[in-house]
Amino acid sequence: MNASPESLKGEPDPALAAEFEPRIIGFLCNWCSYAGADRAGLSQTPYPPNVNIIRVMCTGRIEPLFIMKAFQGGADGVIVLACHPGDCHYKEGNLRAAQRHALLARVLEQMGIERDRCRFDYVSAGEGEKYVQLITEMVDSVKRLGPLTASSGGDHP
Amino acid sequence: MEVSELGPRGRLTFPPAFGKRGSGRHWRIEPGVESRICQTIKLCAKARDSSGVTMRTGVYFCNCGTNIAELIDAEKVREGLGTAGDGAAYFKTCRFLCSEEGKGFLEQDLRDEKPDRIVIAACSPRDHEATFMRVMEQAGMNPYLMQMVNIREQIAWVTPDPEKAVKKAALAIKAALWRVALHEVLEKEEMEVSATVLVIGAGPSGLKAALTLAEAGRKVILVEKTPVIGGLPVLYEELFPDMECGPCMLEPLMGEILHGDHAENIELITLAELSEVAGYFGNFLVKIRQRPRYVETGTCIGCGECIEACPAAGLNPFNGGMDQKKAIAFAFPGALPNVPYLDTELCTRFFAGSDCTLCSAVCPAGEGVIVYHDRETLVERQVGAIVIATGSSLYDCAPLENLGYGRFPEVKTAHEFERMLASNGPSGGEILASSGEAPGSVVFIHCVGSLDDEHKPYCSGVCCQYAFKFNHLLESRLPGLKLHHLYREIVAPGKEAFSLYRAARDNPNTTFVRYDRLADIEVSGEPGHRQVRVAAGTAIDADLIVLCPAVVPGADAEALGAMLDVSLDRFGFFEELHGRMDSARSKLRGVYLAGACQGPADIRRATSQGMAASGCILSELVEGRKLRLDPLFATVDPAKCSGCRVCMKLCPYKAVGFDSENGVARVNAVLCHGCGTCVAACPAGAVKGNHFTGEMILAEIEGALQ
């Protein structure tokens, strides 16, 4: 788990990538993306088990603090999945989440947390396949980035 | 961030520190954030210690037959929770927790074990959270003291590696244990409601809604802008698909509204519009501005003597200005209520200062029936629900100069043509060209403004059907007449529309010309001898040209929407809660939609919508039954609120109001849908989202990262 900074910046060490199992927190809204994850389950399509899901009623509920907290608590990545624009059960909470994510991603980057560690996307209740694909991609990209450590990004005194 | 100083841990284990992985150094996040996280831990500890005894949390693991058990080993999950059970006082498995047997087991076990909190690891909470909450209630436990873990859809069925599945399930249960410790007892509050309903608009949908509600014993306030009820179809003599007479079809419905067995439940207010609304679902206070009719509806016998006597006349708006009407008149022969109204723009008393009293003098019902000093009144009513049934309007064809509408008397809109066909219309039902003769050739221009990105991109849905109805009527009244349909698309869906279309297609005197752009059509020629040309095609002689304009939102939809805080869609129609699944509800609780106010509609759809809205109201707003509020709403801590109003701007349901006396925001629990957008946005952390508090979610995150 003690990845050297070099391996994070450059090509991943294949041995390390195989061994490293990232811990990822997924924030899903009750109506679309969580239902999309359920749909993936109904179709019994396997995907990596690295994402632990936190269900909220709407992605509009997600405070940037939650995401910061997840990273601080040891997560290697965070994925936020919302309803597609126009589909939000609460009209536009997903758009608020998208706005917040755009700002937070910049803050995280300044802190040295790579963009790929904090993703935002849209999954509808019917998009089980898309859910599987997004989770698989997320796990792959975080595996490539390696574990998140205090030294993996910028300089924090 | 030392946890040990927070006191005894109880049975739950807490994280020794955040960011323990990697270098062991903490992330530096701004101090406020750090302190809130610390606060969370303290709260965790407090929740455990406040009662003085260790909190008992039970875990119920549903095997779901073999669905879960075959893929996740419950015993290994229990082991994975750690020796201290990670906060669980007990861990039990059940074959099918949602079966009758399983629910019985759960209920009895909750009574026996008396846990403070429970975690249920089973299927998706979208499947059975409500089921288990009901069991908890039956067992005398507050249903909000439970957290469900989805180990079937999101773990068992998608994680083929049994070891990984066990690990993931244990982690998810841990997260739930951390979260549930902070769950609070939530009760469904109850509120008194008014069961009276305000229906705005007395067209087919509004009438049907009002009558359905009145028949169920509800008081209904039916507000109509014009002096008459019946909406548009009452002006149309023959309706598609089967040439039924509009007034005859609506007569029984209007009769029931005015004089039927349940008429006493309906208060009809004509010439009136909504002027002010306050309150929310169950308790609206509405103010209705009623313009003067100058005729007492209670005493007028509807004989029409006054009309004969009236010396003043002007253009008749009900016939599209195609004929004249008296200053005191019925809107049209047979209009209901059967009481004339006085038009102050035409009566010489009002605009010329005369002292004419001819109408009142001849009134056989005596003096005081015609009231010249009648004034505008403001009617105040308390209602629980509002139905918007304000209908639609037609696209303004005047700016389309190439079509000649407004310039050439031969060019009519479909609405005007309907009046021409009606026996109570301006020509007494005779079809006349501008020459005064019967026309030899009629051109129908379909899709005027519809299916057109330069105008309205949507299909108006009804135009093809009435155009082919016209085709049928003209063919039968004036055999041999040449009929031409200029169209962009033909749309005739459903089980009935095809027959009129088929008849038009089979008619040897009817031709169809497809056009591409509305701008390609040119209406030209001399008075009485018009030609219609499509692009470079041959000119079609036309004695009468009928435009089929797009159906567009009513002129006052925007103002009404703003007054009620009900949203409009991108076309300006009222927006449904859900276009397919919930089309009779608006997005504002307590405000319902019926008919063409939410998009182009035929009579069938409009009346169905009226009944659908009534059905929603009858089930949601029951006389004598208090409104039970879902406790998942947001609350504002006035001590923390700085009054910045960010929450007000973000709330999609206008549920956040401002208490200007105290300078703080306040959430209306009736209107709040519990999305939590305001909770996340509050810069002061003053808004709390019940059951999804920051502390609970943070605890769940911490638990998931063990």
Image: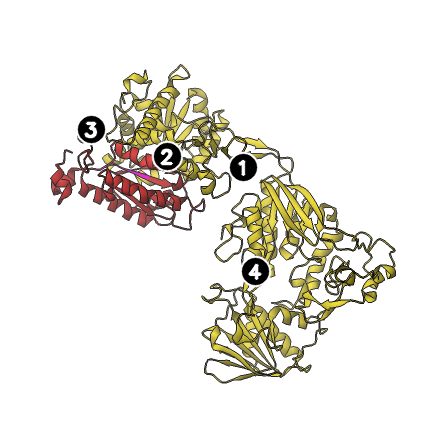
Chain colours: A red, B yellow
| Mark-to-mark CA distance, 2 and 4 | 45 Å
Q: Is residue B266 left or right of residue A36?
A: right
Residue drawn 45% across the image and 24% down it: B108
For disc 2, the neighbor class at 10 Å (few under 14, some 14 to 19, many from 20) is many
Query: In which quadrant of the rendered image does the C terminus of chain B lie?
Result: top left
Chain letter, disc 1 residue: B
Q: Amino acid at mark 4?
A: Ala
| Mark-to-mark CA distance, 2 and 1 | 32 Å
For residue B601, the mark is 4
Q: Amino acid at mark 2?
A: Ala
How far from the left and from the top, in percent, is residue B366? 88, 55
Is A24 covered by the magenta stretch?
yes
Which residue has dot 2 on it?
B122
Q: Amino acid at mark 1?
A: Val
Q: Is residue B122 left or right of residue B197?
A: left
For residue B25, the mark is 3
Q: Amino acid at mark 3?
A: Arg
Which residue has dot 1 on it?
B670
Instruction: Give the mark toward the camera: 2 or 1.
Output: 1
| Residue B269 to residue B428: above or below | above
| Mark-to-mark CA distance, 1 and 4 | 31 Å
For disc 4, the neighbor class at 10 Å (few under 14, some 14 to 19, many from 20) is many
| Residue B433 to residue B579: above or below | below
| Mark-to-mark CA distance, 4 and 3 | 65 Å
Instruction: Give the mark toward the camera: 2 or 4.
Output: 4
Q: Write down the region rendered in magenta.
A: A22-26
Instruction: Give the mark toward the camera: 1 or 3.
Output: 3
Q: Are marks 2 and 1 in contact (CB under 8 Å)?
A: no
